[in-house]
Image (tube, helix red, strand yellow):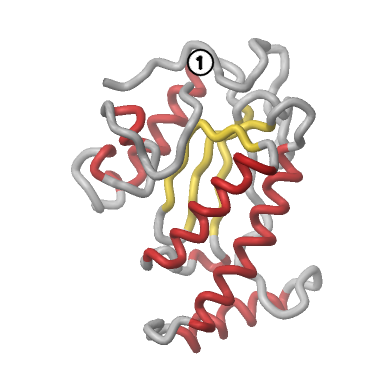
């Protein structure tokens, strides 16, 4: 049974802050975040690359002040509902997460003897890097992540459902909880997913 969002874990009970375009609002309130690969390249079709994201999210939970409420990894993007603990800035967590995962995934692509698309992937990420003066060689993630502050229960529930229904809309599964690379199993069943979450 799906939990109804009533009290936000790791967040203040405060609805006085409105969402700000492209910048996190109150860092202790949950935000809906989306990361996409450059040119929407389907990288996360292999477990080895998805596992890097999972490990990195878990690291950020333990060491970077990430409060993770919900997540889903799709083939070329991921959605999170998250906040920062205490004085932690969401922007700092996301900066470190994106920087680390981009390096790790690119290295995994280079070192993966089973990666049939290796040359093409590295060419595409290299081309994107050359177009952006902020990068030395490669660009893996799109720069924007468009945070949406979830400052009332209606918006929060809408984004939570949207996140978990992504794999259903993509045709990967019939029910959200059948997709293992998301927190749907935590919300729709009595089982635990791959990443420990803090329920909304």
Residue at 69% from the left image edge and 61% from the top image edge: 99
Q: Which residue is mark 1?
A: 153
Give the answer, above or below, for where 137 lies relative to 9.
below
Task: Judge by depth and name the residue closer to the eye, 181 or 22.
Answer: 181
Considering every residue shown, the one lying at the far left of the view is 174
Q: Work out which quarter of the rendered image holds the N terminus and state it.
A: top left
Instruction: Tell me how many marks there are.
Output: 1
Residue at 26% from the left image edge and 28% from the top image edge: 189
115 sits left or right of 60 in the view: left
Q: Position of residue 17 (x, y in %)?
A: 72, 18
Q: Position of residue 35 (x, y in %)?
A: 57, 52
Q: Position of residue 28 (x, y in %)?
A: 69, 25
Task: Judge by depth and name the residue closer to the eye, 192 or 109.
Answer: 192
Task: Judge by depth and name the residue closer to the eye, 59 or 156.
Answer: 59
Task: Judge by depth and name the residue closer to the eye, 13 or 53.
Answer: 53
Give the answer, above or below, for where 162 lies relative to 118.
above
83 sits left or right of 167 in the view: right
* Mark 1 residue crowding within 10 angstroms, few (<14) / some (14–19) / many (20+): some
Give the answer, above or below, for where 90 lies relative to 11.
below
Within the image, what quadrant is residue 124 found in?
Answer: bottom right
Residue at 60% from the left image edge and 61% from the top image edge: 101
Give the secondary structure at mark 1.
helix
79 sits left or right of 30 in the view: left
Residue at 45% from the left image edge and 16% from the top image edge: 5
Q: Position of residue 178 (x, y in %)?
A: 24, 43
2 sits left or right of 48 in the view: left
Within the image, what quadrant is residue 21 found in?
Answer: top right
């Amino acid at each position: 049974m799906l939990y109804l969002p009533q009290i936000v874990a790791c967040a203040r009970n405060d609805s006085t802050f409105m969402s700000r375009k492209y910048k996190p609002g109150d860092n202790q309130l949950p935000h809906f975040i989306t990361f996409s690969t450059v040119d929407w390249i389907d990288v996360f079709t292999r477990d080895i690359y998805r596992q890097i994201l999972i490990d990195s999210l878990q690291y950020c939970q333990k060491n970077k002040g990430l409060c993770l409420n919900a997540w889903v990894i799709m083939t070329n993007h991921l959605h999170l509902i998250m906040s920062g603990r205490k004085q932690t800035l969401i922007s700092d967590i996301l900066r470190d997460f994106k920087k680390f995962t981009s390096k790790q995934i690119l290295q995994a692509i280079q070192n993966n003897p089973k990666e049939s698309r290796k040359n093409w992937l590295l060419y595409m990420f290299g081309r994107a890097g050359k177009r952006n003066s902020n990068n030395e060689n490669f660009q893996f993630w799109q720069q924007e992540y468009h945070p949406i502050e979830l400052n009332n229960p209606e918006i929060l529930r809408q984004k939570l459902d949207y996140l978990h229904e992504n794999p259903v809309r993509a045709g990967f599964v019939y029910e959200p909880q059948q997709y293992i690379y998301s927190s749907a199993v935590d919300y729709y069943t009595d089982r635990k997913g791959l990443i420990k979450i803090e329920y909304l």
